[in-house]
Image (tube, rainbow, N blue to C red):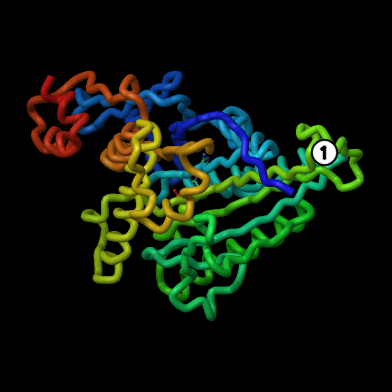
Amino acid sequence: MSIKKSGVDEKVKVVCRVRPFLDHEAPDDSVAVEGSEIKITNQRNTNEIVSFRFSSCHGPEAKQVDIYEQDVQPMIGKVFSGMDSTIFAYGVTGSGKTHTMQGTEDEPGIIPRVAQYLFQRRLDYPKHTVKVHVSYMEIYKELVYDLLIPREGQGAGLSIREDSSRNIFVANLTDREINSLEEFDHIYNNACKNRSTASTKMNVSSSRSHAILSFQVTVAMDNDEPQKDDDSDTEQYALSGKINLIDLAGSEDNRRTDNGKERLAESGAINKSLFVLGQVVESINAASSRIPFRDSKMTRILQPSLGGKAQGMMIVNIAPGQSYFMDSYNSLNFATKSKTIENAPTVNTISQDEPSMSSALSDTPKLGQALRV
Ligand code: ADP
Ligand code: MG
């Protein structure tokens, strides 16, 4: 039996999602979405408006189903033909990453919707054996933990290995076959509890780790299918595809948050891994010959499902409101590095009177250039 991979060359697309104001937040006009463009305005100096264009941009009114139907399903549906895809939720703590990936019982996010879709689509393959496996891991301070089992006994975490065919894998990571949506829900809910219990015990917010949930879907022709021995097109085969759904650690600027020694070590690991992720996405989209997968655990683990024939999507989550202005600016700017030049940010109006803001903006080369125009 041979394992085939198929698919087209697609890169990592970047979309944006702005969450609504929450009940306790005072609404303002600092974020506006028009079509695929997002504009952020510094309410302290309304001359400062920065706009960014994405392949799609979901405003605060967008529902989970909208994002799923427009951006997620077209991508992950190809798993049944052996195509890998990876979806990241990027953004600062409080911007809606977990809502987007996990959601709530009333408003389920991408993970439960993908699970539901897989079991539904399985029915389209009555003459095949379709197997769905799930694994779920967390990366905290560059250590990898299994979320499908309790944290006790996991010590310093799992190691990343390479087999003789140079396939990268996480050694001893639980890989559970799931047979129904109910079974998935049960396992997933327990795993989410494992994640929060482990973080409480370590006195760490779960927003300081990356959580990677993976579905492996294998479609095999049933053995009793008639085979024509001399026709290679009807050779018995299996297709195997993977979907990685990732709730990234908060991307906040740690210089501004309370920073004990422990928090600094955390911040260093988060900053580095997000930086590497940005570089990886940028290199993939630029079709660069060197992609720095090996520079962080997360990108190393995801290497087989990023670039090449795999498809990717980064959802940049944005919280509205002036208090998030610099966070939003940083997130959007990070995200534009993963896009092509026509998506570069443009500064519509520049104030000469507010050096603090301008110098913060000019930290980043692209916008610095725009500011000097
Ligand atoms: P993060 O995971 O990025 O830290 P959360 O997903 O926990 O952020 O979201 C922060 C808060 O905002 C939560 O209370 C969440 O329920 C709420 N929230 C986020 N996105 C939305 C949305 N699209 N609609 C309604 N509430 C949202
Ligand atoms: Mg979260």
Q: Which residue is drawn at 45% across and 56% down?
A: 210
Q: Is mark 1 within 8 Å of ligand 1?
A: no
* Quadrant of residue 366 within the rendered picture: top left
**Residue 186: percent from left, percent from top:** 71, 60
Q: Give the amino acid type for the residue marked by disc 1 in the picture.
A: Tyr
Q: Which of 79 and 209 is in front in this view?
A: 79
Helix, strand or loop for disc 1: loop
- 262 shown above or below 292: below
Q: As drawn, is 292 to the left or to the right of 303?
A: left
User: Can residue 278 be seen in the rendering of this structure?
Assistant: no
Q: Residue at 46% across / 43% down in the picture?
A: 22
| Position in image of residue 163 (x %, y %) | 53, 61
* Residue 283 as seen in the image, left or right of residue 129: left
Counting other residues with Cα less than 10 Å from the Cα at mark 1, is it few (<14), some (14-19), or many (20 or more)?
Answer: few
Locate residue 234, reporting x and y percent.
80, 35
32 relative position to 49: left or right: right
Q: Mark 1 highlights which residue? A: 125
Q: Which of 8 and 231 is in front in this view?
A: 231
225, above or below 249, in the image: above
Q: Where is residue 138 in the image (x, y as percent from the top left)?
A: 49, 61
